[in-house]
Amino acid sequence: MILAITNQKGGVGKTTTAINVAAALASKGRKTLLVDLDPQANSTMSFLDAEAMQGQRGIYHALVDGETPIREVVMTATKMPELDVAPSSIALAKLEAKLIGEIDGYYRLKDAIASVRRRYEYIVMDTPPALGLITVNSLVAATHVLIPIQSSYFALEGTDDLLETIDKIKRRTNPRLQILGAVLTLFDKRTRLSRDIHEQVGRVFGDKLFDTVISKSVRLEESPAYKESIFTFSPRSSGAFEYYKLSEEILSRV
Ligand SMILES: Nc1ncnc2c1ncn2[C@@H]1O[C@H](COP(=O)(O)OP(=O)(O)OP(=O)(O)O)[C@@H](O)[C@H]1O
Ligand SMILES: [Mg+2]
């Protein structure tokens, strides 16, 4: 499975979902690679020390030309030996400009991943909050897409554009791409709004909406600062329980 975690809306829980789903899969003892495709590098910093990153090449280098194989930029998560990370950095913000006019511009990630596919059972990609070239690269490389939806007033804003983009990519370049599902994040079961949004999202996604809902949890916000996933940082928290359940649901759908 090559899983793109995508929603062009900002702050909906893409990174939180990517790091904890990747950790859940890796903790099953299966080699897992987390590819950070966001120039903000939040996923990278959730598992790697800034010091270890100094002077290292990252995913930008593996995509900008054919000269750096992705295995040369991959690093092992500081506290999780089964999890590898293809790190991002702010350099990635230059990628779109560099790839303008390149005929294979949308295929760079697919090609880069092809050389390490056999090493990893699962590859999880965290994407930036935009529907630009980087996100398209991830959808072209992916076998499945997971869409985090924040339980807030504008939850479904932009979903049409995202689904249309996924559809276009399926028709033209990646016919086997499947929407694995949508997951509600930042859920607060005490509020009526959250419950209303749950219903609305259910109407749009039908049985593609995961049964598991990710609640608001301070522990989920804290764990990246300690370079840990929720499973080691706070194993008894709601976040650990819910992301574990989500990863089980993901595996049951693949
Ligand atoms: N379930 C949750 N409970 C509490 N806080 C959360 C939860 N999920 C995410 N957050 C927090 O909300 C903020 C946005 O989450 P996150 O970074 O995962 O979203 P994102 O979609 O990756 O954002 P961006 O679009 O900027 O990349 C972060 O501060 C994160 O710690
Ligand atoms: Mg993010």
Image (cartoon, grey):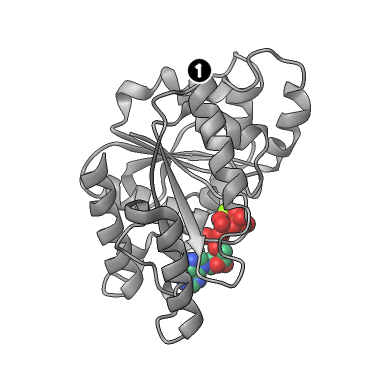
Residue 126 position (above or below residue 112): below
Decide if residue 207 is in sight here: yes
Residue 180 or residue 92, whichever sits in front? 180
Q: Residue at x 57, y 52 (%)?
A: 159
Which residue is at the far bottom? 190
Give the residue type at disc 1: Asp
Quadrant (top left, top right, bottom left, bottom right) of the N terminus: top left
Residue 205 or residue 146, whichever sits in front? 205
Disc 1: residue Cβ within 8 A of ligand 2's nearest atom: no
Decide if residue 221 is in sight here: no
Q: Residue at x 58, y 21 (%)?
A: 108
> Circle 1 sits in a helix, a strand or a loop, which is it?
helix
Residue 26, image quadrant: top left
State ligand 2's quadrant: bottom right
In the image, residue 210 lies at what x, y percent? 33, 57
Residue 197 or residue 228, whichever sits in front? 197
Residue 212, image quadrant: bottom left
Q: Residue at x 24, y 39 (%)?
A: 30
Residue 190 position (above or below residue 69): below
In the image, residue 246 lies at what x, y percent? 30, 57
